[in-house]
Amino acid sequence: MDSTMHDVAKLAGVSIKTVSNVINDHPHVRPQTRERVQAAIDELRYRPNLSARGLRSGRTGVIGLAVPALRENYFAELADAVIRAADARGLGVVVEQTSGDRERELQVITGGRPRLADGMLFSPFALGQSDVDSLNTDLPLVLLGERIFGGPTDHVAMHNVSAARAATEHLLDIGRRRIAVIGAEGEHTTDTSSATLRLTGYRQAYERAELAIDSRLIHTTEHWTRDAGAAAIHELLAEGVSFDAVFAFNDALGLGALRALNEAGLRVPEDVAVIGFDNIDETRFSMPSMSSVDAGSAEIALTAVDLLVERIEEKGQRRPPRTVKPEFRIVRRESTGFPGPGR
């Protein structure tokens, strides 16, 4: 049988009210008592009845996470990190895949569906800067990603420009001069998209090094997938474009590039060095292991959950929106000439 609050109270030697205060993070509980109750909760594996708590408090004890595609490693790992961060706060998570569809993304923020969560972490794909007014909603909302800036919600973003510049500079530092870019956008690019910002960082690195950029090295792709990364390499080779390094705008593109380079008989990193972006787990296990930009994805999840919980608890108050950008780092691995898989 599942443990009850009464069981927890009995084991901890406190009242049911004290257990309730600990579960609901009431501030006026002595640290020793809180530790004793928490130890009893852990021992009995007690889980609060979120439905009952919701009826009393008007909350569900659940937050939402809306992402474009869970089959993409970055979003799968983001979801995992969000779930773990929420669990540490005693919260459940409902994950919704929008498939990058504009109408589904609008439903997420306008309440076009029954609301099953107290607040939402939202990573849009189809919506852009022109949709900023759509973020004016009563639902506590924290925005993720680079599609919309300057909105009315808290926003957790990345240092896209400086991180991309650092990735390019890493390739320049190891002596590469003809660095192909995979993942640039075509005609419908926006000033705030990840692709545009990362391309800006790439250009800045070349400008700082006082080097000219061959426009043929900038390769556009419709999607950021392994297939697109492999296809980009094959197209560059077929066009006769010479390059000694590849900067892939995400790791999926980079992993596809590694495969295509191998198929073409090119050695990595001897002939072509490769660096990706996001530092997903798979980069440690590719052959060779792939260098990447760690844009702070673990901290993004923790920060986003903390910001959302604050907004839920202060619902109705109007504090100015906050933008947070975790620090990034370059993870050097075998694909740029550094030994070991690295973390």
Image: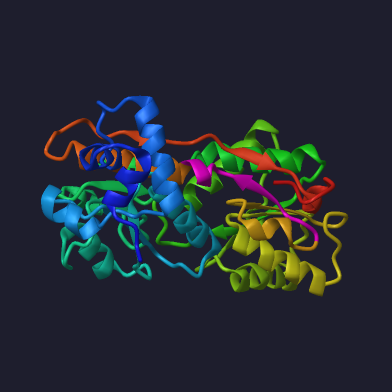
Q: Residue at x 16, y 40 (%)?
A: 315
Name the spot of residue 274 as percent of width and height, x first: 73, 54
Residue 31 percent across, percent down from the top left: 37, 26
Q: Give the residue at x 28% y 63%.
A: 105
Nearer the observer, 190 or 39:
39
Magenta stretch, residue numbers: 288-299
User: Is 78 left, or right, of 342 in this rendering?
Assistant: left
User: Who is closer to the viewer here, 272 or 72?
Assistant: 72
Residue 52 higher or lower than 228, as above or below: above
Up-down relation of residue 244 to residue 293 (above or below): below
Residue nearest the observer in this picture, 97 or 213? 97
Q: Position of residue 95 (x, y in %)?
A: 36, 63
Q: Does residue 110 appear in the picture of this structure? A: yes
- Check the picture and name the quadrant holding the N terminus: bottom left
Give the number of marks: 0
Residue at figure coordinates x 30%, y 59% from the top left: 127
> In the rendered view, does 171 fall on the left or right side of 138?
right
Whether residue 192 is visible, yes or no, is no
Would residue 163 appear left or right of 155 to someone viewing this image?
right
* Magenta residue check for 128: no
Quadrant in which residue 235 is drawn? bottom right
